[in-house]
Amino acid sequence: MAFILGSGSPRRLDLLAQLGVVPDDVRPPDIDETPLKAEQPRPYCSRIARQKAQAVEAAPEDIVLCADTTVALGRRILGKPADAGEAAEFLLALSGRRHRVITAVAVRCGDRVWEKDVVSQVRMKRLSDAELNAYLATNDWQGKAGGYAIQGPAGAFIPWISGSFTGIVGLPLAETANLLRAAGQPVMEATA
């Protein structure tokens, strides 16, 4: 039996380590993450996590963990920006407003799948042109849903959250620990 992380995210690897879990292998799946027509952010996020889990090659007794994090502004899904221009567009849309960060987790073992999604509320301060341009120059927006990561330089733009900080980073630890236990994966609780 092997534990496989179906994600290339170094943040998810770090978060799993907080639970005392080290994957036997890392196998990021290659799936189409295009939203369906009129698909809402929360069902979209859950569908992508589930499809990732199904796409990872694994033996029937292996445990596979996949997750997807989506930034939602109302009904709009803000994925990973294609370039600095799109990152700027996303950040300007989020500037001075509240939005949701949804992380869906799917754990698969054989034909069984355990799933959970966590929705957090985030407020971004109003960004000045100087702040926006300085942030874009860091390139920290690359590969990040909504064009930012709360644990990076953009954390200075986030005065308020309600929900799961680790969920916003990319893997809600309490919920992930419960899913892993349900699938039979030993988890050591993080100590304070």
Image (cartoon, rainbow, N blue to C red):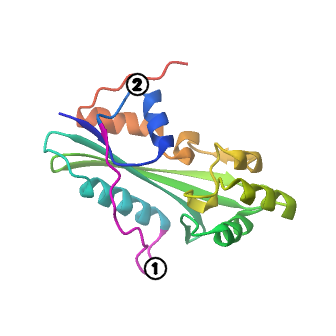
Residue that lies at the very extreme toward the bottom in this rendered image: 37
Which region is colored magenta? 25-40
Graded by Cα atoms within 10 Å as few (under 14), some (14 to 19) or many (20 or more), the crowding at tag 2 reads few
Mark number displayed over residue 178:
none
Q: Which quadrant does the C terminus fall into?
A: top right
Q: Identify the main secondary structure in magenta.
A: loop
Of 171 and 75, nearer the camera is: 171
Residue 96 in magenta stretch? no
- The location of residue 96, given as percent across then percent down, is 78, 61
Q: CA distance from mark 2 to mark 1?
A: 39 Å
- The location of residue 100, given as percent across then percent down, is 59, 58
Relative to 187, does residue 162 appear above or below in the rendering?
below
Q: Residue at x 37, y 69 (%)?
A: 32
Residue 37 in magenta stretch? yes
Q: Amino acid at mark 2?
A: Gly
Graded by Cα atoms within 10 Å as few (under 14), some (14 to 19) or many (20 or more), the crowding at tag 1 reads few
- The location of residue 39, given as percent across then percent down, is 44, 74
- The residue wearing badge 2 is 20
Q: Is residue 20 left or right of residue 55?
A: right
- The residue wearing badge 1 is 38
Q: Amino acid at mark 1?
A: Ala
Q: Is residue 137 left or right of residue 52?
A: right
Element marked by disc 1: loop
